[in-house]
Amino acid sequence: MLTLRLIVPPDRGDAVVRYLTEDDRTTNVYVLRGCAVRPSGDLVSCEVTREAASDVLGWLRRQGIFEDGSVVLTEVAAAPSANARATERAAPGAPDDAIVWEAVLDNAYGEVRGSWSFYAFLTLATAIASVAVVTDSSILVVGAMVVGPEFGAVAALALGIAALRPRLVRDAALLLLKGFAVAIALTVVLALLARAVGWIDVPDVTGPRPLTGFIWRPDKWSAVVAVLAGAAGVLSQTAGRSNALVGVFISVTTVPAAGDLALSLALGAPQQLAGSGAQLLINLAGMTAAGVTTLVIQRALWRLKRARRPDAGQALEQ
């Protein structure tokens, strides 16, 4: 279940409370009249089943609560009461299959704000990947994949395309472009310093690398894995299963390809530039395409299910 906390303008307080109390998929409804200060209005709160959240939020949006009031949605860790179980039974379907599109969109806009930590983690991940290339260490490749934060921006890009949100598409694409440009540039500088002090040389990149040579040699399986990982990653985010993202991180070679590309630039290994660059683009394009396809299918299924109810939510259309 989810906790829904609202600040409602006084002229719509009665209508909101009535709507929430008449829906069997909500419970624990309470209202404190006139207690809210900024924005001013009535404080209304309830628990809502995950399956009903998009319906309820869509109705609230159409009442202008998103613009004139406030809406906060949080996860409920546990609701062991009989009342909560009865409320859950009133909502058809499984909670894990329900998608709260408003939360997905809000998270996506948060992912593309471009914090310094995004650039820091992506640079650190690319640097770790470059060390993995030099030492031919598959363990370090996995570590670089897990540290890399790029999938959030890729998922936001896919959502922006699927939901026809030009601003989200622009911000996500720019963040990915700038993020990898900064990470690769800084890793090139680090590689040049390492070369200057004699730690690495061209053979470290061009020599046999049985454990990491796949990074700059993309093939059909690179595209297959990118597509599967993109679909799994988007599903994990829309269904609230963040634990599955770890598997996504260690499936794609986006960051390792960036590390190999940086080393190739720094040490002058043109024969590997095309391969590592292609690996990077294949992974980004494959994950984005799979994410868009997955979201379109989920959106169609969501519309089909919502069409059976007259109060269906309209998250992606807003």
Image (spheres, rainbow, N blue to C red):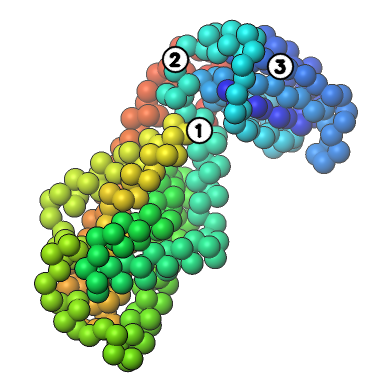
Query: Left or right of 270: which side holds 286?
Result: right
- Distance (Cα) linking label 2 and label 1: 17 Å
Q: Which mark is residue 101?
A: 1
Do we see residue 258 in this rendering?
Answer: no
Check disc 1 and give the amino acid type: Trp
Q: CA distance from mark 3 to mark 2?
A: 21 Å
Q: Where's residue 203, x and y in %?
A: 16, 82
Vertical comparison of 80 with 201: above or below? above
Circle 2 packing at 10 Å, graded few (<14), some (14-19), many (20+), is few
Q: Residue at x 68, y 34 (%)?
A: 71
Alpha carbon distance from label 3 to label 1: 23 Å
Crowding near the residue tagged with mark 3, few <14, some 14–19, many ≥20 C-alpha atoms within 10 Å? some
Residue 14: quarter of image? top right
Disc nearest the viewer among 2 and 1: 2
Q: Secondary structure at mark 2?
A: loop
The mark that comes first in sequence, 3 or 2, is 3
Residue tagged by mark 3?
A: 28
Which label lies toward us, 3 or 1?
3
Whether the residues at callouts 2 and 1 have beta carbons within 8 Å, the answer is: no
The total of numbered circles placed on residues is 3
Across and down, in percent, residue 310 comes to 53, 13
Task: Please report the residue visible at 37 percent of the width from the left and 26 percent of the height from the top.
Answer: 300
Secondary structure found at label 1: helix
Q: Quadrant of the N terminus?
A: top right
**For mark 1, does the 10 Å Cα neighbourhood hold few (<14), some (14 to 19), or many (20 or more) residues?**
many
Which mark identifies residue 93? 2
Q: Is residue 305 visible?
A: yes
Residue 41 location (% of width, % of height): 83, 31
Please state which amino acid type lies under the numbered disc 2.
Gly
Above or below, 52 relative to 114:
above
Spot occupied by residue 84 in the image (x, y as percentages of width and height) = 62, 13
